[in-house]
Amino acid sequence: MAGPTLRDVAKRANVSIRTVSNVVNGYAPVSDELRARVQAALDELDYRPNLIARNLKQGRSGMIALVVPELDVPYFAELAREVITAARARGYVVMVDQTDGDGERERELLSRDSRATMFDGLLLSPLSVSAEELRARGNRVPIVLLGEHIFNGSFHHVAIDNVAAAREATAHLLGLGRRRVAAIGDQPYATGETAQLRTSGYRQAHAREGLEVDERLVVPTPRFHRRQGAAAMEQLLALSEPPDAVFCYNDLLALGAMRALTRAGLRVPDDVAVVGMDDIEEGQYSTPSLTTIAPEKKEIARMAVDVLMESISGAARPPAEIVVPHRLIVRESTTGQVPASPAIPS
Amino acid sequence: MAGPTLRDVAKRANVSIRTVSNVVNGYAPVSDELRARVQAALDELDYRPNLIARNLKQGRSGMIALVVPELDVPYFAELAREVITAARARGYVVMVDQTDGDGERERELLSRDSRATMFDGLLLSPLSVSAEELRARGNRVPIVLLGEHIFNGSFHHVAIDNVAAAREATAHLLGLGRRRVAAIGDQPYATGETAQLRTSGYRQAHAREGLEVDERLVVPTPRFHRRQGAAAMEQLLALSEPPDAVFCYNDLLALGAMRALTRAGLRVPDDVAVVGMDDIEEGQYSTPSLTTIAPEKKEIARMAVDVLMESISGAARPPAEIVVPHRLIVRESTTGQVPASPAIPS
DNA sequence: TGAGGGCTCTGCAACGATGCAGACATAGTG
DNA sequence: CACTATGTCTGCATCGTTGCAGAGCCCTCA
C-alpha cells in the first residue's frame, strides 16, 4: 500500500534524500547526469510525493473547506462549483461539507476536535450559528462568510445587497401594475438575517410607491425549498383576496409556488406573476421561465476565495464587507413574453 | 497563526508530551490529578490537535475525494450529498472536485503530482477516461467507480442496471400505445459506455414488442444538459413523422425536451410523452411533472463508500460489480394524470 | 524480605518531507 | 599560488504527532 519514499528513491539512485527532493521540486541546481539518474529512479519506482508529510513540514495543507447547508440545493451546488473552480485556480482543493441547516452541525465545526484545523481556511454559509458564536469560539483558521449579513463585522463577508435586490424585485412587480404583491420566505425569528433583509426590501418598494403592505400577504417559511413555496402559495390562494403577484425569497420557493398555481388552474403570469432570487439554471427552463434576481455567483466565489487566500497569507486586514453585484433578469413568469430568439436560453 | 502544540501544553502542565497526548486521546490510564492538570492546560491554551501531523503519523488522512463531471448538475449534486453523508457516518470527510467531463482534467488526477495521494480513497465518476487508462497509471490509492459500466472489471464499480432501466422506461412508453418512441442521449462514440447501454435497453424494449426502431428517432447528444435536450427535441419535431414519445437518457435532457415541446405549442403528454432518468428533485415540480427512472441514490452512495472503506482497510477483494436497484416512477409527463393527493410531492 | 505485578508516566524514535548550514570540488581572481 | 567565489551535493534538525519500550513506584504475597 505504502508507496516508495524519497529514501527509497535515494537509495536506488545512490544519492542523498535531499538531492532527490531537489530533483522532484526543481529546487537547487543539480547536474544533468545526476538529475537523469534520479529521474530514472523516480520513474522506475513510480514515486509520488507524500503530500501529508509535505504539508506538515510547510505548515499549510492547500485545502480549504466549504460548508453549506445543503449541497443539493441548486444555488449551493452552483456556488460550490464556482468556489471549487476559483480555488483550483489558486492551487487549492476544496472539502465540501453540509450542515442541513442544523445548528448543532454548524457548531461542531468549531469544536475542539473538528477537522477544521486540517484546512488553511473556511468558507461558511451559516444558517443558524450567529457571528457572535463563531467569534466566541476563537478558531485559529481564517473564515469568510457567504451570504449572511453580519452586522457586527467580525468576519470577512461576501454577499449581494439583499435589501436592494428584494426592493428591485418587488418594484418590478409593482411596476407591472400588480397591486397585491405577496412575499414568500420571511423568517422573522431566524438568527440569519437574510430573510429579514429581503422583507425589508419588499417593504421599501411598497413604501416608495406609497403603498401599504397587507401583512397577510407576507408568508413566512421555515425553509427555502420547493415544498414550502408550494405550501405558502396554497395558503395565499385561500385568502379572500388572493395576490396577483408573488416575490419569493429564492428560486426554489418560486418554482414550488408556480407549481401550486398551475395545479390550482391559474396562469402565470396572467393571474399571478412570480419572481424569485438566485437565478438557478432550472429557472431558465421552467414553464414558464422564471424572472429572478441574479447574483454574480462567479464573483461571489471569486471574491470569497480571494479574501480567504489573503487572510491565509496573513494579511491582517480588518474584516471586509464585500458587496457583489446582482441584476434583475426578466423572464416569462412576470412578462409572459416569449423572448424572440434564441428559443433556447444559453 | 500557529496554535499551541502538545509541547506547549506539556511545558505548561509540567508533564511529558506523551502524557498530554494520552490525555487528549484518552489512551493510557492517567491519574485523576494529573489528568485535571493537563486538562486545565489544554483549556487555557485552547489546544487543537494538528491533524496533519496526526495523519502523517498514522498513515491515513480520513479524507476521500469525490470526482464528478459537474457539481451543478442536479444528479451529481444529489449524489454528492449522499456521499458526503455516508462518508461522514464513517468518520470521513469528502473533497469534491469537478472535471467538466474534460479528459485532461480527469487524467490530471492520475498524474504524478496530483493531490490524489492526499486521500485515502477516490470515488470517480469518469466521463472520458477509460478503465484501461486508469489501470495503466498504477495509482496507489483505492478507487471505486460510479455509474460507468466497465467491462473489464479492473475496479470496484457501483451503478444501476442501465440496460434494464432503459428497457423499462421504453416499455412504459410502448405500453401506453405510443408507436414512435424517440431516444435522446445516445453517444455511439463515447468512451463511457453508459449511453450505449441505455440505447441497447431502448432497442431491447422494441424488440420484445416486435417493433422496428426508426433510426432517425435515435438522437445523439454530446452532453446531458437541458440545452441538448431542447435542441434534440427540436430536431425530432422537424421530422416528417415526429415522435409521439421520447425516452431521454437523463432528466435534464427530458426537461429541456419538454421545454422545447411547450415552446412548439405541443402538449405533454397528450402529443408527446416524455420519460427521463435520475429522478432529480426538479422533475417532481416541473410542469408537467416528470416520469423517470429513479436509481437508489442513497444506496449508490452508501455502497460506494462502503466498498471504498473496505479497500482502504486493505481487504483485497476482487473488484466487485455492484448493481443498485432502480424503479420507474410514473408522473404526469407520461400519464397526464394529476395524482389525486397530496397536491405536493414529498 | 524480596520477587513479581500493576499502575503511571516518560523518552526516544519515527512518519516523509523540507530548511538550513556546510562540505567538497572546481573555477575564477589578483 | 593562495584565496575567494561558484556550483553541486549532503547531513542534520525539524514539522507535531503517536508507537514502543521501559522506568519508577507502590502493593501484594509467598
Image (cartoon, coloured by chain):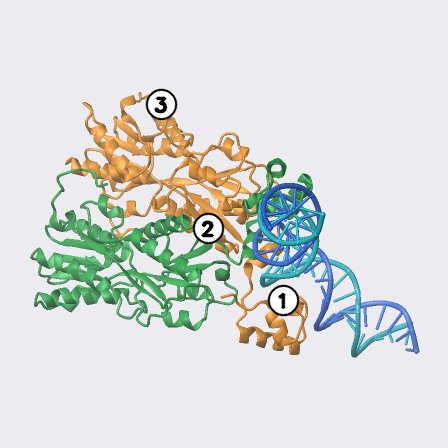
Chain colours: A green, B orange, C blue, D cyan
Q: Quadrant of residue B253?
A: top left
Can you identify the residue that label 2 sits on? B95
Tell me which chain the residue with mark 2 is part of: B
Name the side, left or right, on which A205 lies relative to A84: left
Tag on residue B207? 3
Marks 3 and 2: which is nearer the front?
Answer: 2
x and y percent of residue B127 in the render? 41, 36
Of B6 and A196, nearer the camera is B6
Regarding mark 1 in the picture, which secondary structure is present there?
A: helix
Can you identify the residue that label 1 sits on? B21
Tag 3: amino acid: Ala
Measure how far apart labels 3 and 1 are at the Cα level.
Answer: 68 Å
Tag 2: amino acid: Met
Marks 3 and 1: which is nearer the front?
Answer: 1
Crowding near the residue tagged with mark 3, few <14, some 14–19, many ≥20 C-alpha atoms within 10 Å: few
Q: Earlier in the sequence, mark 2 or mark 1?
A: 1
